[in-house]
Image (cartoon, rainbow, N blue to C red):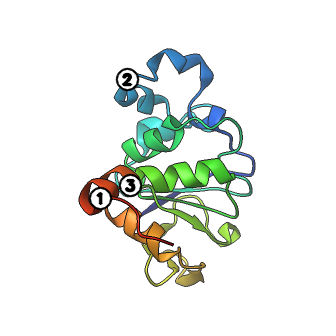
Amino acid sequence: MGGRAWKFGDGISTDHIAPGRFFHLRSNLPELSKHVLEDARADFAPNVKKGDFVVGGRNFGLGSSREHAPTIIKMAGVEAVIAKSFARIFYRNCVNIGLPVIIADTDQIDEGNILEVDLSAGKVRNITKKIELNFPPLPEIMTKILLEGGLIPYIQKHGGLPDI
């Protein structure tokens, strides 16, 4: 995975990700994705490119458990979300829809840096700064779910989850 970093701060909520005023678009996710993170950064949705990364601070995805919040981030072309910490429900929703979530020190990533992520090695390579950040590898089952594109594709292919 490789792309450009879009930097956000602490406390980005699901309301920032999927603004409530567009609630009527929840059944039209392609249209809703045109407004992703609009309330945090108006320049994000129209300019994000496939393969880019959302880089946040602490408690990314706090607030209501809107399942469409991580879905529209993924639909916008974002490769992964990297943050210092995540709200628990948002984190699980990301894994369930196949959007990688990485807990790392985002202070060393600046707006526009070119990043590469290796999920299996637990590494974020900041190509721009020529540094490497380590992150705790995801549990094996989460990695498998992500590689299949989310929980539903995983279950469809494997007939259920393994005993953990």
When the figure is inspected, residue 45 is found, relative to residue 97, above or below; the finding is above
Query: In this rendering, does residue 126 appear at all?
Result: no
- The percent coordinates of residue 109 (x first, y second) are 61, 68
Tag 1: residue type? Gly
Question: Is 100 on the left-hand or right-hand side of 82?
Answer: left
Pinpoint residue 104: horizontal percent, then vertical percent: 64, 71
Q: Which mark is residue 28?
A: 2
Question: Pointer 3: residues within 10 angstroms few (<14), some, or many (20+)?
Answer: many
Relative to 104, residue 19 above or below? above
Q: Earlier in the sequence, mark 1 or mark 3?
A: 3
Which residue is drawn at the image coordinates 74% and 47% (left, top)? 11
Image-based side of 145 in relation to 164, left or right: left
**Gap in Å between the C-alphas at discs 1 and 2?**
29 Å
Q: Earlier in the sequence, mark 1 or mark 2?
A: 2
Which amino acid lies under the numbered mark 2 shown in the image of this protein? Asn
* Rendering quarter of residue 64: top right
